[in-house]
Amino acid sequence: MNIVVAQSGGPTCAINASLLGVFRHATKYEEIGTVYGSVNGIEGLILDNLVNLCDIIADDEDVELIRQTPSTVLGSCRYKLPDFKADRTVFETITANLKKYGIGAFFYIGGNDSMDTVMKLDDYFKANNIDIKAIGIPKTIDNDLPITDHTPGFGSAAKYVATTMQEIIRDSSVYSSKSVTIVEIMGRDTGWLTASSAVLRQNGEVAPHLIYLPEAPFSVKKFLSDVREAQQKHYAVIVAVSEGVSLDADDFQSGKVDNFGHKYLSGVGKALEKIVSQEIGCKVRSIELNVMQRCSSHLSSKRDITEAERIGGAAVKTALDGFSGRMMVYKRVRNHPYNMRIEHVDVREVANKVKYFPLEWINETQNNVTNDAIEYCMPLIQGEQNFIMKNGLPKHYVLRFALSHDKRKGKIE
Ligand code: F6P
């Protein structure tokens, strides 16, 4: 049989490593012929836009470059499949294309929304006696997928967040006058990534002095009182705030949503900056780490990249063992020395579900995290990658195969 792999949802530094894991592992099996890649996630299977990965990954240098390139070499999407009982059309198109390429297994690297796609395809295949396996490979910097100990991509994002936070702390602490610096960190409805900034404590940093996660209630009044209290001890107060924290007045956001109904979150740092400026009046600056936290591969965690490749390979074995409708998961065995194993679970236990940051890891005053968060994150940020450089810059692997607007029109939008 042939197989196809696709990438979906928000990019990470590790999602290409999982693609490599699928490709490199698949090429070891005699049962597997061609390994295809679907361009822009499931959209490629709807629009018949597949590429042969053997053409793309031709030699060892391609492997190295893809591993060190952030984002998704095959492009991505936020496409939501309907319920096949309500509308089978798109399922029939996908199945026809899968059959056209002789595909026996579909691997989808993505987050909770992408697992919805794996679940729906698996439901459709099983209901119609179609022998095609659908396997989910987790990824997201948000670390919000249930069951898996952590998600590929999180460790690298956490390493970037902590490193950048440390640099911001140095920069913001040079003056003898009072200041507040607010750093906005991604993570949607969960605070895992924001909490990871606390790992700096392991190296003796006191900042960020205040850490706010969406899991804890937030009030502007309490925030201002926390900042004033921190200013009693520190001239330069550093705040880490999750993009998903909702203020009492929510109107700073655009209100736009993606196909899965998720709000485009951005701006909480700026909104708090205005509030501090008006109410406290000292120097205040907000910094939105924005997409840098999911694409700064120069600061990626080697452990994250290595694990991401392993979990991609394990997914291939899972399909060959006859499983379908499964998502691969990490199970942490121990922290000292760190060890984990890879298993798989029913994708229905993960699709559209969220794993929140544990409330018991938030301190009593709900403005910081306990050492449990540090213990959890530390193993995941370990190790540095060696990079192939070009003209003093990390070299990236770039494919250009965007479909023309005309070909997509009426089918995807
Ligand atoms: O995929 C996770 C994530 O990076 C979130 O942290 C963020 O809120 C969201 O994606 C942004 O989505 P988009 O890439 O569609 O702007």
Image: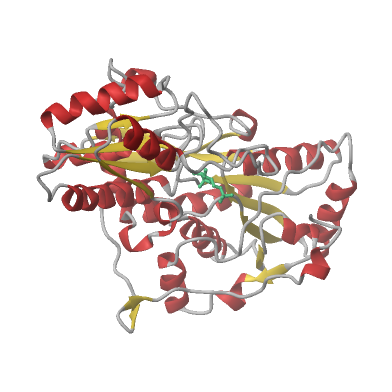
Residue 243 is drawn in which quadrant?
A: top left
Query: Is residue 104 positioned above or below 60 on the image?
Result: above
Q: Position of residue 356 (x, y in %)?
A: 46, 27
Q: Residue at x 62, y 50 (%)?
A: 108
Query: Is residue 226 positioned above or below 317 on the image?
Result: above
State the residue in front, 250 or 130.
Answer: 250
**Side (left or right) of 328 relative to 84:** left
Q: Position of residue 200 (x, y in %)?
A: 20, 41
The image shows a total of numbered marks equal to: 0
Of all residues, the one furthest to the top in this rendering is 364
Colour approach in the figure: secondary structure
Q: Residue at x 48, y 79 (%)?
A: 59
**Side (left or right) of 359 relative to 281:** right
**Side (left or right) of 303 relative to 318:** left
State the residue in front, 76 or 30.
Answer: 76
Q: Position of residue 376 (x, y in %)?
A: 30, 33
Quadrant of the snapshot with the C terminus: bottom right
Quadrant of the snapshot with the N terminus: bottom right
Query: Visible in this render: residue 103?
Result: no
Q: Position of residue 267 (x, y in %)?
A: 47, 42
Query: Visible in this render: residue 168?
Result: yes
Q: Residue at x 82, y 46 (%)?
A: 130
Residue 122 is drawn in which quadrant?
A: top right
Query: Is residue 91 positioned above or below 375 on the image?
Result: below
State the residue in front, 306 or 295.
Answer: 295
State the residue in front, 272 or 152.
Answer: 272
**Side (left or right) of 266 relative to 336:** right
Q: Residue at x 29, y 68 (%)?
A: 386
